[in-house]
Amino acid sequence: MFKKLFGTDGIRGEWANKITPELAFEIGKAVAIIFEREGENNSIVVGKDTRLSCDVLESALISGITSMGTNVIKIGVVPTAVVPFSISHYKVNAGIMITASHNASNNNGFKFFNGNGFRISDEQESHIEHIISNSMDYASAPFDKLGKIITSCSSVRAYIKYIRNELKFFKPLKICLDCANGSSSYIAKKIFKGYNCKFISSKPDGLNINSKCGATSISNLIEAMKTKKYDIGFSFDGDADRVRVVLNEGKVVDGENVIYHLTKYNNYSSIVTTKMSNMALILELENNGINCVITDIGESAVIQGLLESSSYFGGENNGHYIILNKTTCSDGLLIAAQILSILDNNPNLSVPYIPFCQYEKAIQVKNKNDIINNSFIKDKIELCESLLEENGRILVRPSGTEEVIRILVEGKDEKLVNEIGETIKNSIIRLN
């Protein structure tokens, strides 16, 4: 079944265009139906980020869930990782996070988790769409069987305690945290209470989430780190499942470096990363006897790789990292806690390899599928690959959430890499 609502990371879109209270209500009904356990007291956890539209979507979503006889546990504004944590804490059927992650405040969406805390399957996504398309076939519960709404913070308190237990550093570090005016704005202050921390972009007003701040716009954090007042800085995105790391003097730590240090810190013998990761990282780890499983881009692909390879750690160089023996989704706050512990022994987060040169660009297009399937573009990429030979690679792919074509060219010769990248970029622009 072709899915109209779901993308690579749940349902996401522009407010009042794709994302509406009416859709939220239908989603609530559908999720309650799919995860109902016969003969049990059914409940679903609902969390949200700081967008102005979250309150109305939360109300509509909860109305849909409770109309089918399923209870809701509201946990309020939390990072996405708290939702699967809460599923385990309360032992409920499923969880939904209302968020558009790193996107602007005029967007919103929904992330879905099953009773085990993992993202729902493709089949379950299709089932949700089927129920929404045939909503009139599903009657509401009788008046005396409607679901109840419970507001609870016990899982949030437990999560704060859990992350604080991961803080195992002893040096008196000065830390700067950019909360993107999002989900981490409140909870991070509780996690890092008692530590020498400065919080920036941590005063959400419903409209400023991800606005010139956070993991996708780290210039504010870089400028703060250039003052030399802090030893390390972390920048989260709107729902805090992504984190970027910046050191003193504004040095940005590559995602591959984070993957390397987390792998070594936890003594993993096998990891999962995506085809976007720098080839130098993969070669270094494999030379050290660490198996590297390479997957497609996206958290779902990484999790599938983790489960299939029985690995505990996987990551993407864009700031998503999953420690499967600790959580079931990417968690920026957990990663920040571990990086602080690593910093005790390696204050520069240095690595023993030299990254390959990279050219990366995101090109806004009218129709990403038409561009990516165009024979002219395919021929151009093939020609450029012949120039690189065995000393690099080219990856041109459509974004999973936007009308964007992403280009990655990698190799040892920086001049050649940049020339190839510009050639492909200009070819895409010519067709657009």
Image: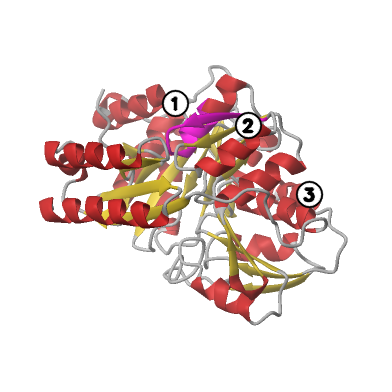
Residue 388 in sight here: yes
Residue at numbered disc 1: 121
Residue at numbered disc 2: 286
State how far apart marks 2 and 1 are (Cα): 31 Å
Tell me, yes or no, whether the highlighted magenta stretch contains residue 155.
no
The magenta segment: 290-304
Q: Residue type at mark 2?
A: Glu
Residue 208 horizontal/vertical position (percent): 44, 71
Q: Is residue 368 above or below residue 247?
A: above
Q: Residues within 10 Å of mark 1 (few under 14, many from 20)?
A: few
Name of the residue lying farthest toward the top: 38
Mark 3 or 1, nearer chain start: 1
State how far apart marks 3 and 2 are (Cα): 27 Å
Q: Which residue is at a point 86% across and 64% down the rendered structure image?
A: 171
Q: Which residue is at a point 18% across and 51% down the rendered structure image?
A: 428
Residue 128 horizontal/vertical position (percent): 36, 29
Q: Which mark is residue 321?
A: none
Q: Nearer the viewer, residue 266 or 275?
A: 275
Q: Which mark is residue 166?
A: 3
Of helix, strand and loop, which one carries label 2?
A: helix
Residue 5 in sight here: no
Q: Pointer 3 and pointer 1: residues touching (CB < 8 Å)?
A: no
